[in-house]
Image: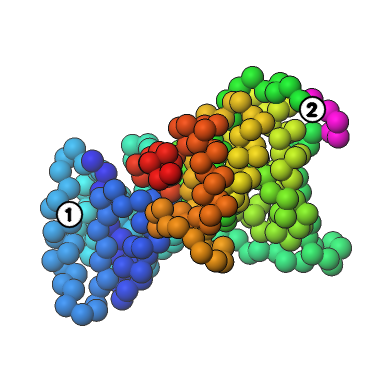
């Protein structure tokens, strides 16, 4: 079993808890310790955690400051234990990289995961240094030429997932779904984003290294996904509404999984709450009913670790 400890001076560690649960789910064995506040006995917390690690377990301890007192106490307690690893100077990307890793841990594996997490820490350049203008996003997937795709779906592969998520590309997509689906590329099909260069830039910032991304209108997205070149890629398609998902589902016959993720929180007006992540207007409920007739296995699922709930049970 893998076990994790997140420990810090004051309340940084427990502050991470809700965010980690949001991205990674709550089914991991994680202990949080905020030292030197309230009645927390750090020495006792260290002893209890270290003693809970059996020879068959692997544990990673995250501490805030290298050489700080919290770090020192865990290092001393874990000395000479080859199945316990201590990571100092923790940040959220590194914690998630390690917690979500399917690999057995070793010093080299931990070092590589830390290196991956470090790439998420960088300055965001708002102005292109050469032109002095707002930097324009670069398209990283070859675009389908106008008129190239026919009405026939030439893509003989399976589109791994079509997900409804009103935030489109964000942390859960980048850190969790991209790993679960082992993606090569992400296709955003949204008319507004396709016409807004600033929004495109913001969305592409979230995409992990090695994953290609393209942002298209709904019509152009269908053309792209019908192209036979798409059959060689493991793809996640993101749309903002259930109506948009229905538009694509009616024209594509090779969607492996149709997922309702986050939808409705940013919509004003009367809504019916299906789950804490899915709230639908009357029009969107009608769209969902039709979507289920096209793809009966359409399911509500926020994170890959969550149970899939068939949309049909809600209609």
Which secondary structure lies at badge 1? Answer: helix
The answer to whether 54 appears left or right of 17 in the picture is left
Residue 139 visible in the shown view: yes
Q: Position of residue 314 (x, y in %)?
A: 40, 45
Residue designated by label 1: 50
Q: Disc 2 or disc 1, which is closer to the eye?
A: 2
Start-end of magenta stretch: 145-150
Residue 47 lies, with reference to residue 34, above or below; the image says above
Which secondary structure lies at badge 2? Answer: loop
Residue designated by label 2: 149
The answer to whether 46 appears left or right of 296 in the picture is left
> Which quadrant does the C terminus fall into?
top left
Residue 246 lies, with reference to residue 32, above or below; the image says above
Of the image marks 2 and 1, the number of the one nearer the N terminus: 1
Along the line of sight, which residue is nearer the eye, 138 or 260? 260
Residue 272 lies, with reference to residue 38, above or below; the image says above
> Which quadrant does the N terminus fall into?
top left
Along the line of sight, which residue is nearer the eye, 120 or 55? 120
CA separation in Å, label 2 and label 1: 59 Å
Q: Residue at x 27, y 71 (%)?
A: 34
């Amino acid at each position: 079993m893998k076990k994790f400890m997140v420990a810090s001076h004051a309340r940084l560690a427990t502050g991470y808890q809700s965010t980690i649960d949001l991205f990674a789910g709550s089914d991991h064995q994680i202990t949080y310790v905020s030292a030197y506040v309230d009645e927390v006995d750090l020495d006792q917390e260290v002893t209890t955690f270290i003693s809970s690690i059996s020879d068959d377990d692997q544990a990673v301890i995250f501490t805030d400051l290298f050489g700080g007192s919290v770090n020192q106490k865990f290092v001393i307690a874990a000395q000479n234990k080859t199945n316990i690893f201590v990571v100092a100077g923790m940040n959220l990307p590194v914690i998630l990289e390690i917690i979500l890793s399917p690999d057995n841990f070793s010093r080299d594996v931990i070092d590589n995961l830390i290196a991956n997490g470090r790439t998420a820490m960088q300055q965001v350049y708002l102005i292109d240094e050469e032109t002095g203008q707002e930097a324009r996003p670069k398209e990283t997937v070859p675009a389908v030429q106008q008129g190239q795709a026919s009405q026939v779906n030439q893509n003989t592969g399976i589109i791994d997932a079509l997900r409804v998520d009103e935030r489109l590309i964000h942390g859960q997509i980048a850190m969790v779904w991209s790993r679960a689906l082992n993606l090569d590329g992400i296709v955003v099909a949204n008319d507004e984003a396709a016409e807004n260069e600033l929004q495109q830039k913001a969305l592409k910032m979230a995409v992990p290294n090695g994953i290609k991304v393209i942002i298209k209108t709904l019509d152009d997205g269908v053309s792209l996904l019908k192209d036979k070149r798409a059959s060689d890629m493991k793809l996640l398609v993101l749309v903002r509404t259930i109506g948009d998902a229905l538009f694509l589902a009616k024209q594509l016959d090779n969607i492996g999984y149709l997922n309702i993720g986050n939808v409705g929180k940013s919509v004003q007006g009367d809504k019916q709450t299906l789950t804490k992540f899915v709230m639908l207007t009357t029009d969107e409920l009608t769209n969902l009913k039709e979507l289920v007739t096209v793809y009966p296995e359409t399911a509500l699922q926020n994170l890959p670790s969550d149970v899939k709930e068939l949309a049909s049970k809600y209609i």
